Image (spheres, grey):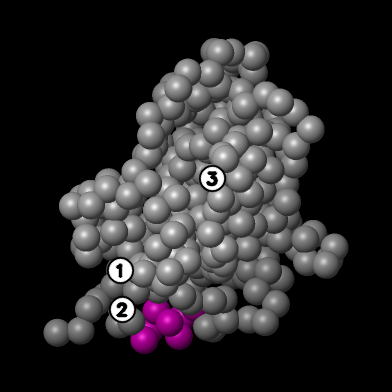
Amino acid sequence: MATQYFLSTGKQKIGPLSERAVQDGVRSGKIQLFDMILNAQTNEWVMLMQHPDFSDLENGSDDSLNEERSQKESHAAVGLISDSIDEDTRGISFLTPDNIPILTPVYWYEKDNAHKRLKYLEVLSMIHSQKLSEQSLISKNPTGPWRKLVDWEDFSPASLENYKQVSKDNLPDINIRRKFPRFECGKVFVVLSKGKGYQAFCPDISKSGLAFIVRSPKADLNDPIVIKFNDSLTGNKFDAKGVVVSVRKVRLPGSESIYIRYGVRFTHLSESGRDFILAAAASDKQAA
């Protein structure tokens, strides 16, 4: 029996749909990559762009950014959360320099060889020798969750450059293509993790996630995160929810200080959060 899919459209759910119906919906613009779909394997709701069966889909229109905007009135925002988070944010603390403790090393695992623990540099060498490809499934845990190598922020050009700045290792020559390009941001956001709020600098952002930099550790791998795309709060309104997928020490250009860079994968966006990212994409497109 062919796989059937269920999508969430605001307060309604649509389905069962065939794979072809979902693909046609994306191409026609009736279904967006931000919409939520039930992953039958994990029984979790994820954004359509993050579902393994549809991760290679592109928006149907050649001018997808304008199309997404024009459809806001006729097509209910799908997979979006309320911009209010039921968290007590009155105790938000702002950045102050702290001592940076030693971080726990992160190891990688290949799905087809999950018993073998790999260091970051070993993964890069396997990419260089073509033992791993962009589509290889890897994880930071021997039991998963497994994601395509190209979907890990850790192997983006920016992350590789950051690694070079803080490592004496000679990195092999590799080229990883990212499905969703990152746009320059350069703004300070308010982030909430472990029940505490703080300011963080965001160097870049994409449709599927962002990076932020702080002076001292604020979260661990797989921690849930909520973010306001601004340097202050209006009440307790937030723009995005996500999960930490990478943690790395970095040295910023022109500075000898070591900072902590986090990679975050979005799980939900509010309408205002989506508009912020679309505006950043449009601005980047005009600049080009």
Within-10-Å neighbours for mark 1: few <14, some 14–19, many 20+: some
Kind of element beneath mark 3: loop
Within the image, what quadrant is residue 70 found in? bottom right
The single residue placed furthest to the left in the displayed view is: 1
Q: How far apart are the two marked residues, 1 and 3, measured between alpha carbons? A: 46 Å
One can see residue 222 in this view: yes
One can see residue 228 in this view: no
Please give the label number shown on residue 6. 1
* 113 vs 28: above or below: above
Q: Residue at x 61, y 45 (%)?
A: 164
- For the magenta stretch, what is the residue range? 20-26
* 275 vs 245: above or below: below
- Which residue is more in the foreground, 135 or 37? 135
Q: How far apart are the two marked residues, 3 and 2, measured between alpha carbons? A: 49 Å
Between disc 1 and disc 3, whose residue precedes?
A: 1
- Which residue is more in the foreground, 235 or 244? 244
Q: Residue at x 65, y 14 (%)?
A: 96
Instruction: State the image coordinates of residue 176 (x, y, percent, origin top left).
Output: 54, 66
Instruction: State the image coordinates of residue 103 (x, y, percent, origin top left).
Output: 43, 27
Instruction: State the image coordinates of residue 33 (x, y, percent, origin top left).
Output: 50, 67
Q: Which residue is mark 3?
A: 169
Q: Main secondary structure of the magenta part?
A: helix
The single residue placed furthest to the right in the displayed view is: 287
The residue type indicated by label 3 comes to: Asp
Between disc 1 and disc 2, whose residue precedes?
A: 1
- Which residue is more in the foreground, 85 or 137? 137
The residue type indicated by label 1 comes to: Phe
Please give the label number shown on residue 17. 2
